Amino acid sequence: MLKLLVPLSLLITESLYADDIDQRVLIDGEVLYTEECQKCHDNSLVPISDGTSMQSLDDIRWQISTCVSALGIFWMPNDEEDVAQYLNHDFFHFENTPKPDS
Ligand code: HEC
């Protein structure tokens, strides 16, 4: 039985990271964004953009923190990170740099 389980769990882990980002992160980010952010960032899901202010994933992280605190909503730190990953993956396409320690 154990012999069967080990390769199976390896397979699951591998498919989750096929895209480098855990799909659950992207789904969580999309749900959070749809719930809290579309009031201002319309239904097309495209963030407000002047095409110049966001230059990196860290800029997106910073802007999301700013929007979240301005709105007074209470997200866990990894909620912000999930939305940052989602917006970057679907819209901005910056290099996926690790989150700096804060
Ligand atoms: C009350 C309206 C409002 C809500 C709700 C809002 N934002 Fe924003 N957001 C703005 C405005 C205004 C800007 C432009 C700020 C600037 O350029 O200084 C902005 C800019 C941004 C940007 C930068 C986009 C770009 O291309 O420059 C991101 C990313 C962003 N918001 C994410 C979010 C997220 C994530 C949420 C949900 C937590 C959210 N916003 C909710 C008003 C809002």
Image (spheres, helix red, strand yellow):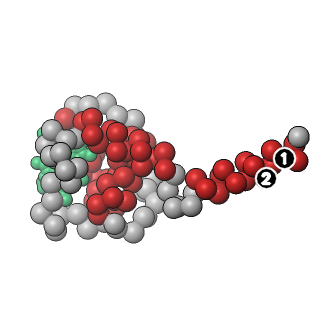
Horizontal placement of 58 versus 67: left or right?
A: right
Horizontal placement of 63 versus 32: left or right?
A: left
Residue 14 seen in render: yes
Horizontal placement of 75 versus 3: left or right?
A: left
Horizontal placement of 6 versus 88: left or right?
A: right
Quarter of the rendering occupied by the N terminus: top right
Residue that badge 1 annotates: 4
Residue 80 seen in render: no
- Above-or-below relation of 1 to 45: above
| Residue 18 location (% of width, % of height) | 56, 61
Q: Residue at x 12, y 63 (%)?
A: 50
Kind of residue sitting beneath label 2: Pro
- Above-or-below relation of 69 to 44: above
For marks 2 and 1, give the CA distance: 6 Å
| Residue 100 location (% of width, % of height) | 43, 56
Q: Residue at x 27, y 48 (%)?
A: 64
Asked if disc 2 and disc 1 are in contact, CB closer than 8 Å, the reply is: yes
Please state which of residues 4 and 71 is positioned toward the viewer in this rendering: 4
Q: Residue at x 23, y 63 (%)?
A: 54
Kind of residue sitting beneath label 1: Leu
Labels in figure, total = 2
Q: Quadrant of residue 90?
A: bottom left
Q: Secondary structure at mark 2?
A: helix
Residue that badge 2 annotates: 7
Q: Secondary structure at mark 1?
A: helix
- Tag of residue 93: none
